[in-house]
Image: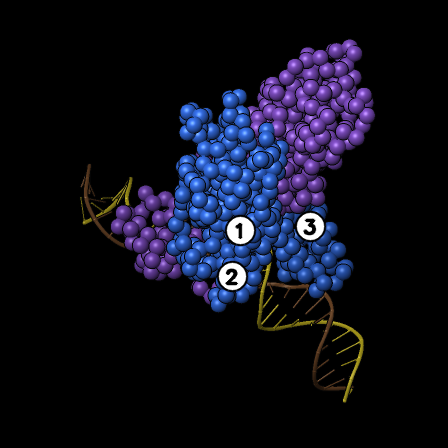
Chain colours: A purple, B blue, C brown, D yellow
Amino acid sequence: MHVAAISVRDVAASAGVSVGTVSNVLNRPDKVSPSTVERVQAAISQLGFVRNDAARQLRAGRSRSIGLVVLDVANPFFTDVARGAEDRAAEDGLTVLLGNSDENPGRQSAYLDLFEEQRVHGVLISPLGDVGDRLSRLRARGTPTVLVDREIADRSFSSVAVDDVAGGYLAVSHLAAIGRTRIAFVGGPHSIRQVVDRLEGARKAVAEHPGVVLETIDTDSLSVLQGRSVGEKLLARPAGERPDAVFAANDLLAMGVLQALNMLGDVRVPRDIALIGYDDIAFASAAVVPLSSIRQPSALIGYTAVDLLLREAEGGEDFEHEQIQFQPELIVRASTAG
Amino acid sequence: MHVAAISVRDVAASAGVSVGTVSNVLNRPDKVSPSTVERVQAAISQLGFVRNDAARQLRAGRSRSIGLVVLDVANPFFTDVARGAEDRAAEDGLTVLLGNSDENPGRQSAYLDLFEEQRVHGVLISPLGDVGDRLSRLRARGTPTVLVDREIADRSFSSVAVDDVAGGYLAVSHLAAIGRTRIAFVGGPHSIRQVVDRLEGARKAVAEHPGVVLETIDTDSLSVLQGRSVGEKLLARPAGERPDAVFAANDLLAMGVLQALNMLGDVRVPRDIALIGYDDIAFASAAVVPLSSIRQPSALIGYTAVDLLLREAEGGEDFEHEQIQFQPELIVRASTAG
DNA sequence: CATTGAGGGTGAATCGTTTCAGGACCGTGC
DNA sequence: GCACGGTCCTGAAACGATTCACCCTCAATG
């Protein structure tokens, strides 16, 4: 468009002041006499001046945003995390840039590049695969980083997570407690730490219950679609070879499994197969058979992560990295009744 | 952090070339001899140089992003739209910035300010209330704008929408066809055009079916929670005064209603109350009673909107604004069976 | 041999905001 | 009358990538 862009210079000329004064009106109005403030503001709205954020950031050296990379925006768990993060960021006048890696290392990497080029205030990431080195470099160059829903073993990063081993343990202990003995764990890929931990928790619970066996069914991702195809595979088995309980690594998968099982009338949840998911998303309670699940404080995770990030940014290089861990909670509904 | 930021100047010095050449390596490697490209790239990775996007944008005058303001990120319909938009934007090397107005005019306005300060390539918005003037000014200053899921009467804006009147008509005609006569429309606020249109379509269908009456129940927003409270209110009525069918303005509301009705055993869906939603989100088919709905091509809407935006940006001031409208589709499931 | 043009490279100017050292002005206190 | 401290403003410098007019070389051409 050929509309000449209006700059502080134009505003200054129109109001009969210097550019420095315009900037002061914008950023420290108390340092400018009221009459001048008024004159400048009149010029601003008359000319339709809009601050150029790029110039601002260039000067400032940092943007006023925080980058957040999640595994899947379609998963309500992550939108809840994002909402919590936004809330905390807003308290400090910051914005959250949401990047969806879609469980794809290439996209994850692209977002990290983008955020670094944008000189974001910091990065929150629910990491995929082995990005420890990448993140170390990022941090070394001055961008603080907090891991969301994951802690890295060597404690070199700050993190906010939920104890997924405990969650897996809760889920399977519950299934065992209601008398199920042939349990299937559905989830994948194993590059996602949560999947591995929940499985580990599941194994731990099984070990404590003699007579209970655990089968694992791998999936390519944690989506409704993948769940549905697992459900179809279960239906295809002879009745005797089906598990009598399924622990899905998240609610999306669980709902997919549920959809598939529900298509054919002869398998009933929870009568034939009990089903429990993970995350306790809002839709879980509205499922065909209301879904038992493991609840995580999702918004709180996001909120805390930003908080930690800001403290880390404040503290500088020598900041003591902190690992915060929340405990999950078992929510029992109809899908594991009896 | 005290890590000195690396600039093109440092890279140039280290590689023994001029800054102009470094820039050329970054942007037009074919204009630089292979040996020089290699030398510069070695310097870049050795120094850990990362382009400063703010400086880039300042010079370029525009950012490489598109702003998208949606009514509710928790609504899968909008995340699908966003996904479609991202896909199309990626084809042109652009990024999508997602802003959630949460049906709040203040937040909507804040995002528009932010996007304008960022000098985004363009804005996609699912507008709330009366923002025509605001958007006109935005466009006058050079930011092309496309309305998503809404067209403005005077055709002064480009838009991508679905015919919501037709959708409302489809839903209620279907309810009438299965013999329901006391239909309740649940939705709100009326500042959302979709709500108004779907209601209009509903009225149109009712008018064609003598003996069918329509009641409207207003809500403050289109969320599961609001739906649940409507459901509770319906339950509180004497059985004879309840509608025998509910048309909810979106699936979230419908699922809320369904949850509430399901808590008490004496009202059954669809036997006592048939229920149909709108958007056909992925969770609709996994609901307690699989939900009938009106499907919209959500990802396609986002994709097309960006496409239109880019064409408009290309065309300049004299671009002929275009209104694209898709047709919705009725999806019948158990919640309106019989 | 002079001319032309292409390929490869240079570096100062530019984008728009913020910052900061300093200047003008005015009232106060000695 | 003068120094002093405020208050209010000024305007040049800086941030870092990109652009563009220009320069240099060298080979091909007439």
- Location of residue A322 with respect to B321 vertically, above or below: above
Q: Which mark, residue B322?
A: 2
A33 or B122: nearer the eye? B122
Crowd rating for badge 1 (residues with CA inside 10 Å; few <14, some 14–19, many 20+): many
Earlier-in-chain disc, 1 versus 2:
1
Q: Which mark is nearer the camera, 1 or 3?
A: 1
Task: Please tell me whether residue A303 is drawn above or below residue B76 in the rendered image.
Answer: above
What whole-number distance in Å separates the C-alpha atoms at marks 2 and 3?
45 Å
Q: Most extreme residue toward the front, as rendered?
A: B211
How far across and how far down the image is residue D1, in percent?
A: 18, 49
Q: Position of residue B125 (x, y in %)?
A: 49, 50
The C terminus of chain B, quarter of image: top right
Mark with earlier residue (2, 3): 3
Query: The disc labelled 1 sits on which kind of residue?
Result: Val
A291 up-or-down from D17: above or below: above
Label 1 marks a residue whose chain is B
Where does label 1 land, which residue? B162
In space, the residues marked 1 and 3 are separated at their CA atoms by 49 Å
Give SS at disc 1. Answer: strand
- Determine the residue positioned at 72% across, 25% down: A267
Residue B90 seen from this side: yes
**Residue under label 3:** B44
Q: Earlier in the sequence, mark 1 or mark 3?
A: 3
Instruction: Identify the residue at horizontal 67%, vertical 32% (top origin).
Output: A259
